[in-house]
Amino acid sequence: MIKILVVEDEVSIRMPVVINLELEGYTVDTADDGRQALDLIEVNDYDLVILDLMMPYISGEEVIKTLQNQNNALPTIIMSAKDSPRDRINGLQSGAIDYITKPFIVEELLIRVRNLVNSQLVVHDHTYHLGRFRLDLKSYKATSNIGDILLTSKEVKLLQLFISRPNEALSRETIISMVWNQGENPSTRSVDNHITHLRKYFEEDQKNPKHFLSVRSVGYLFSDKFLVQNTG
């Protein structure tokens, strides 16, 4: 079941959001400031955070910055009264995957959450085996051909994308739009370099890959034939 943390200091905003998310079938926890949010994130496995920016003690911006410093790629939706174009751009560039301005209709937020849950951006399961290698997408840890490694945030996002869209040919442009933040402007060569890294880590034979396959004139395809979710 998808578990969501709602971080909002105004009860009149927080409670309608929580009630409606629960009616949608999600498990929901709440925090009314950034400090409490970070404490909850440390001891819980959340799939999504809905985060206000202007809060007591620790702001929403600081929460996002702290998660990034911890290499935590927890998907975040910002909901804020800061509604200028620059505010929205800054929020998305900070690493949030969506930004909704107050006041908003709760139904709109629910649709955004639903779309994200149904997309590659929210991955409920975190631990897998890819062949003989173990992947933990929450801790960023993995076993690999070169031993135990700590994956980068981009490598984790790329793996999340592939795992949620297996056996589907994805163009380099699609991969960039889903893995890189707005404003980063990577070249398609950046995608190739990251695929090279993943093959180095997880392919038994990099010249004849079984997991991360090239699709001529398109991009790449992830085969989930050897992917197993770890339920233990």
Image (cartoon, grey):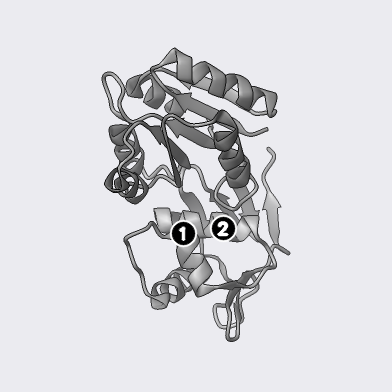
Three-letter code for the amino acid on which mark 2 is drawn: Leu
Hey, what amino acid is under mark 1? Val
Q: Which residue is mark 2?
A: 161
Q: Which mark is residue 160?
A: none
Q: Which mark is residue 179?
A: 1
Pick the quarter of the image with the N terminus: top right
**Residue 82 appears in view:** yes
Q: Nearer the viewer, residue 123 or 113?
A: 113
The image shows residue 27 at horizontal and vertical percentages of 62, 25
Gap in angstroms between the C-alphas marked 1 and 2: 8 Å
Classify 10 Å Cα crowding around label 1: few (below 14), some (14-19), many (20 and above): many
Whether residue 83 sits left or right of residue 140 in the image: it is left
Residue 67: which quarter of the image? top left
Number of marks in the rendered image:
2
Above or below for 104 versus 194? above
Q: Which of the two discs, 1 and 2, labels the residue nearer the N terminus? A: 2
Residue in the foreground of this view, choosing between 166 and 104: 104
The secondary structure type at the circle numbered 1 is helix
Classify mark 2: residues with Cα within 10 Å, few (<14), some (14-19) or many (20+).
many
Q: Position of residue 207 (x, y in %)?
A: 56, 83
For the C terminus, the image quarter is top right
Which residue is located at x 36 percent, y 69 percent? 186
> Does residue 228 appear to the left or right of 64 in the view shown?
right
Q: Secondary structure at mark 2?
A: helix
